[in-house]
Amino acid sequence: MFQNEEQLENALSEPSPEVIEALGDLEGTFLVLGAAGKMGLSMARMVKRAAEATGGSRRVIAVSRFSTINDEAAFHSHGIETIRCDLLDESRTDQLPFAENVIAMLGMKFGSTGNESMTWAMNAWLPSVICRRYRSSRIVAFSTGNVYSLTPIAAGGSRESDALMPVGEYAMSAVGRERMYEYFSLRDNIPMALIRLNYACDLRYGVLVDLARKVFNTEPIDLSMGYFNTIWQGDANAWALQSFAHLASPPWVVNVTGPETLSVREVATQMAQRMNRPLQFTGSEAETALLSNTDLAQQRFAPLRISTAALIDGVADWVSSGGRFLGKPTHFESRDGKF
């Protein structure tokens, strides 16, 4: 699929024609909050490249503590400004430059067990800080499919209109995050979209990568969470940016993930055959899983550019060839909401 990380990063950040069209109708600066995580660099680059595709210029600013995956130099090399900021420090957040368009990618999931107070601060209090600072902006904010309950496999996944029944404190705090965005959107008439993302994947992280590494290392595959959804990160970026065309108050809510309900057993079997590895499983599939229905996204957004089948093959090849990983396991197999 891709021979090296440069090719991978270029593909992750390539704007679709629909992204170029959606952003072309917007004026002003783009601010990406929490930009140093897994998706932030490719998201900021996609915005920048969409502007360049129309022959214009776009000021794109990435804000983060820059203590995780991507450092500031990676952003600067693509013409993206950076600001170091601990967003929990309101005195610093209040000094951030105004931007007409805000992409809020911040949050805390992994390490939340045992650090519940920080989890709630990041996920449920920080959105209020952002909304007060950017009450005159357009906001696309990332949420998670974990706000839903586990659903029967045959039901085809939770829909945006389903009641939120979170499992565990992380998921509860994610509902708190959505409620804060909703409150401020209604109070201040802020146009927003909430992106309920369910497992993005590039070749260096994601559910497929977790499975492929276990297969390659002949480790047992846990079947307790026997089914899942996933989406190519480049497509998740593109769908999120297209949501700028659907902002509303109260926020427009959309599930973002791949349309297929994937079987852990079947995907692992495909990978084992491709890698020529023996395969072993532990446990058995439950009748429920964390799944999202994407009918709304498929109606409103452009078709996905990389299929699940191609992504499975690409991940298997990347793992087999010794590609680099981000060291960010998804823990998708958790059924008790502890991360």
Image: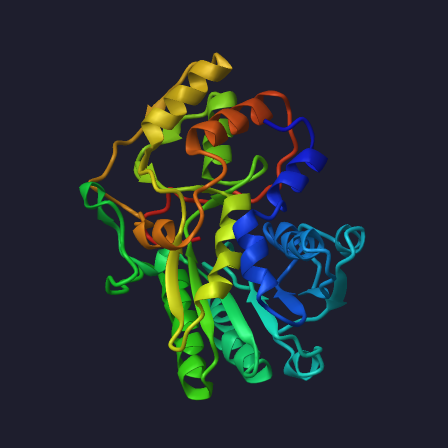
Query: For the point 58% across and 21% down, which residue is it?
Result: 320
Which image quarter: residue 260? top left
Is residue 115 shown to the viewer in this render? no
In the depicted structure, whether residue 127 falls above or below residue 280: below
Which image quarter: residue 197? bottom left
Near-viewer residue (234 or 339): 234
Q: Residue furthest top?
A: 276
Which image quarter: residue 224? top left
Number of numbered labels in the structure image: 0
User: Looking at the figure, which quarter contains the N terminus?
Assistant: top right
Is residue 50 shown to the viewer in this render? yes
What is the x, y in percent for residue 65? 69, 64
Near-viewer residue (189 or 335): 189
What is the x, y in percent for residue 253? 37, 64
In the image: residue 223, left or right of residue 136: left
Q: Residue furthest front?
A: 55
What is the x, y in percent for residue 33? 62, 66
Query: For the point 55% across and 84% down, which residue is it?
Result: 132
